[in-house]
Image (cartoon, helix red, strand yellow):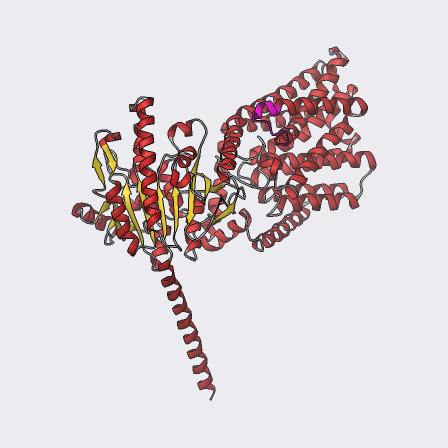
Amino acid sequence: MKNKKIISIILLVFLIQVFAQSLVYAENKAHKNEKLIIITANRLDLEDFKSIDSVGESNQGYIGLMNIRGAKGTNDASSYASIGWGRKSYVLNRDLTFFDYSDVAKSNHYKFTTKKEPSKISNLNINTLIQTNSESDYGAIPGNLGEIANKNNLKISVIGNSDKEEPLLFSGSIAMDTFGRINSGNIDDINIVDYEAPYSIRTDYDKMLNLFREQYKSSDIVVIELGDSYRLDEYKKMMTDSAYEEYKGTLINRLDSFISNVENELSKNDSLMVVSPFPSLENYKEGYRLSPVYILNENEEGLGVLTSASTRRDGVISNIDISAYINNRFELINPEISGKTIVEKQYENPWTFLEAENQKIVSLSSVRIPVLYTYAVFEMCVWILTLIIGLFYAKVPKIVIRAVKFILRITLLIPLVILIIPIFNFADVIYSLIIGLLFLTVGYAIISKLIKNDLNTIAILSGLTTIILLLDMAVFNQFLIKNSLLGYDPIIGARFYGIGNEYMGVLVGASLITISIVFEKFGFKNIILVPFALAVVFIMGNPMMGANVGGTITISAAFLFLILKSNGVKIDIKKIIGIFVAIVLIVSFMAWMDFNNENRSHLANTILNIINTGPSAILQIIIRKISMNIQLISASMWSRVLILAIILMVMLFYKPFGVLKKLCQKHPYIANGWIAILVGSVVGFMVNDSGVVAAATSISYVVVPMLVLLLNNSDDINFLKK
């Protein structure tokens, strides 16, 4: 009897499994009624898409701007590959040696190098791509989309090429499987000789349309590469401006006609995507480095913009999101991608919005480095000037000392000015910066006149910075940070939401020095410090607010240290272990929040990547952080700021001897705050990709108050007598 029950259970489990598999099969069969057509028209810009009537004048569809970065900088081939593989990828044109099965010599060579049978279209250099990307920080898997499609009985085909003097197929990297194979398509004999075209080659659009009709019948996903736009952009340097503009107009008309014809072939459940994986070289040089993407769903009305959980920014997506969109559309489970599916959001005037957004992004990007470089140099010059005045303190007029102290405090005002200038909403970023700086400097001068105490004015300044940063993250969806010069750049694409490492460092320094000065004035109270610390840590780590894991670790370590020191607890190895355990618990709580959030942030994605990939993912993260910091130490101006700050503190420690110790004894709570900021700087340096930046911006809140207090203590500062 018992055996019969066991057999019955086994049969029941087997039947359930068979039934589940039949559902999957039925689901895949249902996909046959949904097709996705991807048209790649490379080197086109937003204004070009708008000029294509079937795109720009359509009364339905969604438009977006796409970050084009690959694993190592930017190029056409890497952006194409990132689209298909779902992770930042690294590919060069020479790695794209696709051939048709009819080429016997290449087919035999492919068999020799891979020990696999070639398909209709295959890539001779697939092993190079695998090797190159396995060594990358991002762990892209070449052919990921094609592989997962094959496993789910979805058919992908490719039509077209971007041939010049030599054969070139970019879109093959989107459709191929992990052995570089594509089951169907046509990449040869599509172009015609035309001596009035770049390289005397152009696409035969009539033949392309007929090939599309053939592939459409048997394919779930058809990738079409229209190479004329790429060839024209490459050939532009050989043409006069008038010749280029004339041919560009002709090309736009041909593209419009072809896209319209493709649309006419689609069924009601189909979708069409038109994407330019890379912008024109001219626009790229001018800073317009986001490429346009257009999606049309035949069964949907309405206009709008594209966004994704990768960016959380209306109108902006990442190239790796397209793979996620394809996987989501066909309900494929693909843990090997890091992109997030594209979301279509309705807008009344999407083109107007996107053009303004593009211009704003480019304007900020173009002045970001010059402005921040100027700020860093100005800050260092003021610090050095203060040190010189300290050396000759007895001979310097009091009015000069007061002026220097005011300018010192202004260096802490600049991050606040840069933060709030988006409120002014002027077309010119520099004009907004100047107006904001003048406005706040005058306001701060008035406050300084009314409040004579330097510590109080520093507390007001750093406190205001802290409050605005916390409110911006918690309430205003990081509007100020996203549009700030000290924020992050969608063109670079290192971060799209939350708080970046620049303002993370500012928040660490500003919040700690503010609460320390408050305790200096009114006495220490745990009832104030603990809730304040919890609020700052929660907002920093919350996936929908600050969403900065490294920042959460940094500020948690700093505040835990401050709480222990302020309560007179001696810091030993047990306390350090306790701090570490507390940080692990805090990050675990934030991870739990993130996993229960629909739009998961970097933390949940990182944990999932570690689960799916194994310990190698942790190694990739560590290597990426170390390499980024090494790069920034050698190239970034912030590393100079950090080094100068360390030199200044070491000098003040040794000369005049004992002055820093005396200052710390006179202001014990501020001294605890300084040490906590230094702890945060060290931790921030170690756990963040650009830890140098976070350490430099936070340590300013140690150096400036320290120099101001030293200038206020004339008996301790006369270096020449010591």
- The stretch of residues the image draws in magenta is 423-433
On the image, the x and y values in percent for residue 667 come to 78, 31
Does the magenta portion include 427?
yes
Q: Residue at x 60, y 47 (%)?
A: 544
On the image, the x and y values in percent for residue 94 come to 29, 37
The answer to whether residue 696 is above or below residue 23 is above
Does the magenta portion include 30?
no
Left or right? Give the position of 672 relative to 502: right
Q: Residue at x 21, y 37 (%)?
A: 192
Q: Residue at x 43, y 82 (%)?
A: 7
| Frontmost residue, 425 versus 524 | 425
On the image, the x and y values in percent for residue 138 come to 44, 44
On the image, the x and y values in percent for residue 127 come to 30, 46
The answer to whether residue 346 is above or below residue 483 is below
Q: How many marks?
A: 0
Residue 135 in view, yes or no: no
Q: Quadrant of the C terminus?
A: top right
Q: Residue at x 70, y 45 (%)?
A: 535
Q: Quadrant of residue 267?
A: bottom left
Left or right? Give the position of 463 relative to 610: right
Left or right? Give the position of 47 relative to 507: left
